[in-house]
Image (cartoon, rainbow, N blue to C red):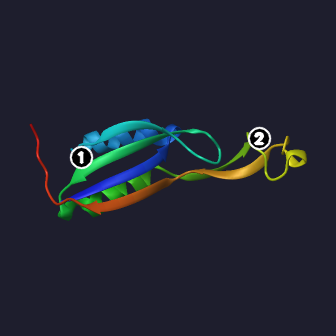
Amino acid sequence: MKMIVAVVQDQDSNRLSQALVEADVRATKLASTGGFLKSGNTTFMIGIEDDRVEEALELIRENCQSRQKMMTPLSSMGSADSYVHYPVEVQVGGATVFILPVDRFEQF
């Protein structure tokens, strides 16, 4: 058994959640916040059998696409005089995925 921890942008969260339900993949959703852009994310914790890991990864891949977005950074990019007040193009979306072995699973 594996634990998949997938951090996705909020914009992709509902689409991924629906795809997981339709594929009978159980997941727990947690609200989270990104570091650099301070934007909302959703972290999915997915406990899954070893032989279904690739299926779950494909669902994440299909439903969490990266895209370019214009954003104004909220923090300094260096010294106090170098605050960036103009929009910059950044890549958002996609997913950051960790796959961990599960030594033991209990459900009560």
* Residue farthest to the front, as pictured: 80
Q: Where 60 falls versus 53 (above or below)?
A: above
Residue wearing tag 1: 25
Of 25 and 39, the residue lying toward us = 39
Identify the image quadrant of the N terminus. bottom left
Instruction: Report if residue 63 is visible in the image.
Output: no
Relative horizontal placement of residue 11, taking residue 102 as reference (left or right): right
Q: Residue at x 13, y 51 (%)?
A: 105
- Give how far across and how far down residue 36 sits, in percent: 64, 48
Of 4 and 80, the residue lying toward us = 80
Badge 2 or badge 1: first in the primary sequence: 1
Q: Where 71 falls versus 57 (above or below)?
A: above
Q: Secondary structure at mark 2?
A: loop
Q: Amino acid at mark 2?
A: Thr
Of 19 and 89, the residue lying toward us = 89
- Give how far across and how far down residue 15 sits, in percent: 42, 39
Q: Where 61 falls versus 18 (above or below)?
A: below
Marker disc for residue 54: none
Q: Amino acid at mark 1?
A: Val
Foreground mark, 2 or 1, reads 2
Q: Residue at x 20, y 59 (%)?
A: 102
The span from disc 2 to disc 1 (Cα, nearest Å) is 37 Å
Instruction: Report if residue 9 is visible in the image.
Output: yes
Identify the image quadrant of the C terminus. top left
Residue wearing tag 2: 72
Q: Are marks 2 and 1 in contact (CB under 8 Å)?
A: no
* Residue farthest to the right, as pictured: 81
Label 1 Cα neighbours within 10 Å, binned few <14 / some 14-19 / many ≥20: some
Q: Secondary structure at mark 1?
A: loop
Label 2 Cα neighbours within 10 Å, binned few <14 / some 14-19 / many ≥20: few
- Give how far across and how far down residue 52 sits, in percent: 22, 59
